[in-house]
Image (cartoon, grey):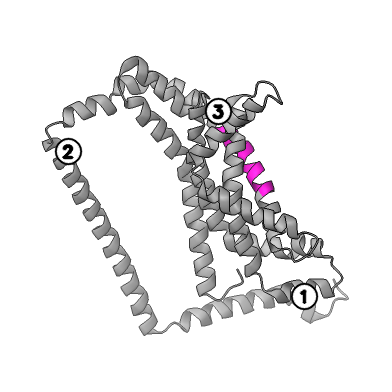
Amino acid sequence: MQNTPPIFQRWPKLLVFCAETTMNNSSQSVSAVELDRRQYRRKQNLTSVVISIVSTLVLAALVATVLGLSPGWSRVQQSFFSGEYFVKSFPAVLKGLWLNVQVLFFATIGVAIVGTLLAVVRISTSAVLFPLRALAQVYTTVMRGIPMIVVLYLVGFGIPGLNLFGRIPAAVLGTIAVVLTYSAYVAEVLRAGFQDVHPSQRASARSLGLTSAQTIRMIVIPQALRKVAPALMNDFIAMQKDVGLISVLGAVDAVRAAQISVASSYNFTPYVVASVLFVAMSVPFILLNDWYTERLRKRELNGGVV
C-alpha cells in the first residue's frame, strides 16, 4: 500500500463522498410542488382505503340483513352450511381432492407438451408439414367447440369400448380428456404469442446461423411466453376447476366424495366443502396471475422491456 498512488488510496472515501453528494442533491432537487403532490397522493390513497372499508362493511351488513329476513334462510343454512356435516365430510372430500391434484399435475404436463407442438405446427410454413398443419387447425377448431363433459363421456366410454388396453382407471381417462380439451385452448394462446414476436427477431436469429428449430426454441418461445403468461395462467385456473368433472366417470375425487356424503346424509354441506377446497387451491394462482399482469402493465407504461 505504500507504493500505491495517493489517488487510489483515497478511492473508497471518494466513492462514499460522491454517493452522499448525489443523495443530498437528489433530496434537495425535490421542489415544494412535488412534495405537495406526494402529500396529496398519500391523502387520496388513505381516503380511498377508508371509503373501501366502509363500503365493504355496508355491503356485508346489507347482505346479512337480507339473508336474515328471508323466510327460508334457516332451512338453507341448515342444508348448506351445517357445521356438523362440514366436519364429518371434510376428511373424505379432502382425500378426494388429492386425486384432483394428481390429475391436474399430469394434465398440466400433457397440455404443455401437446399445446406447444400444436402451436409450433400451426405457425410453420413448410410445405411438407401442410397435412399436419391442416390437421392441427381442424383439431383446435373441433376441440374448442365440444363441451368438456362431452369429451369426458367420449373418452371415458369410447376408449374402454375398444378393448385395446384392458381396464383403464377412470382418473387416467379423465386426464386424457382434460389434455385433449385444454391443449386446443393453450395451442391457440401460444400461437398468438408466437405470431406476436416481431419477424425481425427470427430474421436476426437466422442471420446469426441458428436453425429454424433453434430460433423457435431460444428466441421465439421465451419472448412469446412472457406475452401470453396471463392468458396461460387463466387457462390453468379454469383447468383446476374442470378436473372436478372427472367424477362423471366414477373417479372418487372431491366432487364424487361430496356426492357420496350427500347421498348418505341428504345434506348439501359437503358440496360447500368441495367448493371451499377448490377455491383454496385456486386463490394462490389467481393472486399470482393478478400480480404478474399488473407487473407487465407497469413495465409497459414505464417503457420497460417486457
Residue 111 sits inside the magenta stretch: yes
- SS of the residue at dot 3? helix
| 16 or 159, nearer to the observer | 159
Distance in Å between CA atoms under marks 1 and 3: 46 Å
Residue 89 sits inside the magenta stretch: no
Magenta residues span: 101-114
Residue 88: x %, y % from top left: 37, 18
Residue 21: x %, y % from top left: 57, 80
| 116 or 164, nearer to the observer | 164
- SS of the residue at dot 2? helix
Q: Is residue 225 above or below residue 165?
A: below
Residue 8: x %, y % from top left: 79, 77
Amino acid type of disc 3?
Answer: Leu
The residue that disc 2 covers is: 67
Amino acid type of disc 2?
Answer: Leu
Amino acid type of disc 1?
Answer: Ala
Residue 81 in view here: no
The residue that disc 3 covers is: 99
The residue that disc 1 covers is: 203
Q: What is the total number of numbered labels drawn onto the structure image?
A: 3
For marks 2 and 1 on the same chain, the one whose residue lies earlier in the sequence: 2
Most prominent secondary structure in the magenta stretch?
Answer: helix
